[in-house]
Structures are given as C-alpha cells and as structure tokens.
Amino acid sequence: MSKITGRTDGQSGKGEAFSSLRVPEYKVLWWGGLFSFMAVQMQFLLRSLLAWDLTESEASLGQVYLFFGLSMLIATPLGGVAADRLPKRAVLIGSQVLIATAAMGMGLAVVTGRETFWMLLLAAVAQGSAFGFFGPARTAFTRDLVGREQLGNAISLSMLSMNGTRIFAPSIAGALAGVAFIGIGKTYLIAGAFSVISLLAMLRLPNIAPAASTKRNPFLDIADGVRYVAARPPLRRLVLSSLFVIMFAFNYVAFMPALIEGEFGLGEGSVGLMSTASAIGAVAAFAPVARRADSPVARLMMICSGFGFGIGVMLLGLAPNLAVAMLITAGIGVMTNAYQSLSNTLALAMSDETHQGRVQSLMQLSFAGFGMAAAPLGILAEAIGLRQTLGVMGLVAVASMGAYVLLEQLAGQGLRDPAYSHAAQSPTAQSAPAA
C-alpha cells in the first residue's frame, strides 16, 4: 500500500487541537492506542498493588520496575529496527498480543490463588518487551499517517490518549481491586480484555510497506541508528537529556504506593486518586500543547516543561498530606505531558524517514532507564527516606535540563528557532552512514 500523506478531506485544520483526527487511518491508530493505554495503565497500578501486598517492601516495588526496564532496554533497540524494516502494523499487532497474554496470564494466576512474586516479574518482562516494540512503531507510524505538517498535533493527541487514560484507569483498577468478588485477579482480566480491543483496532490499520528493507544483521542496524544520532549534535543532545529526565523524574510513579500507604497511612484507593490527579493535569495541558506543537515556540515550551517536571518531583517530596500531594502531582502531569509530547515531536522532525523508528527507540530507552533506576532508587529510599529520594530524583532532572540548555547555547542554538526541526542537517550529519 502506498504511503499516506496526512490528508484531511481538503482542510488542514492546522492550529486546531484535534485536527489530525481528520485523517481516518490515524483515528483508528488513536483509538487502538487509547484501549491499549487503558490496559497498560491499569496494569501499572495492579503490579504495584500486588507487589506491595506480596512483599510490603519498597525495594520490591523497585525490582518490579527493574525487570520491566531491563526487558525494555533489550527490546527497544530491536523494536526500532523492526519499525524501520517491517510493516509497522505487524509490529503493533504482535506487541498487543504479548500485552494481552501477560495480563490474562497474571489474572488467571491471581484468581486461582497461585500468584507469586516471580510471576509478577515475568509479567513485567513481557510488558516491557512488548513496549519496546510498540512505542517506536506507533510513533513512527504516526508520521506515516499524518505527514510532517500535523506531526506535533498528532503526537500531542497520542499523549492525550495515554495521559487521559490515567485519569480513570488507575481509579477504576483501584476501585475494582478493592471489591471482594472482583479483586486484583479479575481486574487483570479486564485489563487483558482492553488489550484485545486494541488488537482488533490494529488489524484495521493500513499495511504500509517499510521505507527501507534489509536482511542484514539487526544489530548492525542498531549500531547504524546510534551513529545516526551521534552524528547530529542537536538530536544527540535531545535524546540524552530526555534519557535522564525520564529515567529519574518519572520514577515518582513507581513509589506512589509507598508514599500514600507508607508515608500518609492511607489505602489503595488513594493511590488511584493520586494517579488521577497527575492525569488531570496532563489532559489540561493537551490543548495549548497541541495547538503550538508545530510552532517555533515548541522547543522553548519543551525546555520549560522539563524544568517544571523536575521541580514538581522535588516538591512532591515535601508534601505534608494527600491534598497537597495531589495538587503537586496535577502540576507534574501538566509538565510531563508537555515535555514528552514536544520532545518526541522534535526528535521525529529531526529524523529521516529511514531512521525514525530507531531514533524513537533511543528516545524510548528513557523508559527502560526509568525501570532500571527504580531498583537502586528503592534501595536509596530505604536507606535515606522516600522524601529525600524524591528530592534527588527531581534534582537530577533539573540538572539534566540545565546541561541541555547550556550546551544548546554554547552551540549557538536559540530557544526559539523556526528552523530547529531541520537543524540536524549539518555537514557532519549528512556524512553519517545510511542504512
């Protein structure tokens, strides 16, 4: 099938919050992603609740995310190669099958009373591996479907589907898990059913041929992707800063059960409320971000939101009660949504079509790093305290953004630059090896 170039039935709708949904194929991808994220957000909370119930250990919470991160670390580079070399539809379908299988398997184990901590780790590995393929393919597919003109808007909408589900998915999961005749096990099965719905949507996507195809060793393609990014200083700085910001700041979600139940002495339902507060902030940020994601101020907004993300996590460590913590996490949600949407948009804008999957896989490695950093951060929390650890996490994110801005200024790159999306086309960059 030929490539789709973002047709919108004669109206571009540029500057409108939902303009990219006028592309029918992207609408299918968006709805499929909505149900997939619904399932995934439920499982994130369920894994934390089950890990805490089985161990009541902050270090164990970190271990669950460590296994998730390690599997993502291994799978994500391969997922980037798959997104560039295989039909993205097939990659998305395969990842959804794995996510659904992991959720159903975990649900059956809990329902039959055979759940163990190692099973939870195995489910985390399965989901991390699926994410490693799902993320790069879905983001790269977005560019295929809507084209460059509406890329920022479409990425913002994709983030809306992810963050929007965080409003009600954790609350639903927490509420259902607390009902005696449903519990964590049947809630897992419900999450698996949402993954099946997502799978059915993915089956309706167009089967677009990849931009490039090769039968060579995939590890050579991974190395080529790394060289591609390394040869483009603006892209390299963006990828590295994103790695550290997400790796440390986003880990606040891993320790929500410990903060709510351990520090505030509240129940599982409050954990869902905390996640909901963050998601409400993320959704509130959608419209202004979506309208400006393809404008010259996009990079300035990305920088400001990165700083705000780190500062918010630092403030969370000082929260005296649930009400203040919820207010802070709502602000964190605003910053998280803006930072992720804009950094991914900029990375795609600076990538050639033949490398966009691998570039996105490198961006997504930040979530593998987030999972891997959770275990040592959990150990640190037990050693110095959870609140102090949250302060360290936020400080690292702020320092990373500070280093990014400093290096950009030294390179002569202004904070507002209409041509920034083409900044990768330097003489050095153009001499980089092609796949």
Image (cartoon, helix red, strand yellow):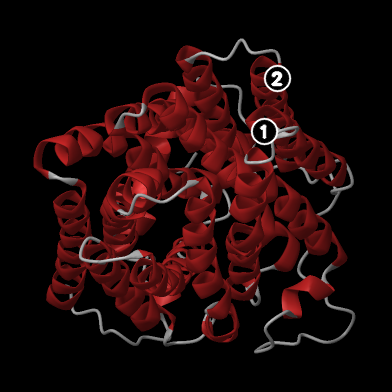
Residue 421 appears in view: yes
Q: Which residue is mark 2?
A: 111
Picture coordinates of residue 423, whole percent (x, y) = 36, 71
Residue furthest top as drawn: 114
Q: Is residue 252 above or below residue 83?
A: below
**Residue at 52% in and 17% down:** 122
Left or right, residue 19 beside residue 334: right
Q: Quadrant of residue 298?
A: bottom left
Which amino acid type corresponds to the residue marked 2 in the rendered image?
Val
Q: Nearer the viewer, residue 339 or 195?
A: 195
Which amino acid type corresponds to the residue marked 1 in the rendered image?
Gly
**Residue at 40% in and 25% down:** 67
Residues tagged 1 and 2 counted as in contact (Cβ below 8 A): yes
Mark linked to residue 433: none
- Of mark 1 and mark 2, the one earlier in the sequence is 2
Kindly state the secondary structure of the residue where label 1 is placed: helix
**Mark 1 and mark 2: Cα distance apart in space:** 8 Å
Left or right, residue 357 beside residue 220: right
Q: Which residue is mark 1?
A: 183
Residue 220 appears in view: no
Crowd around label 1: few <14 · some 14–19 · many ≥20 (10 Å): some
Q: Quadrant of residue 115?
A: top right
Picture coordinates of residue 24, whole percent (x, y) = 87, 65
Crowd around label 2: few <14 · some 14–19 · many ≥20 (10 Å): some
How many marks are shown on the rendered structure?
A: 2
Kindly state the secondary structure of the residue where label 2 is placed: helix
Picture coordinates of residue 98, whole percent (x, y) = 68, 26
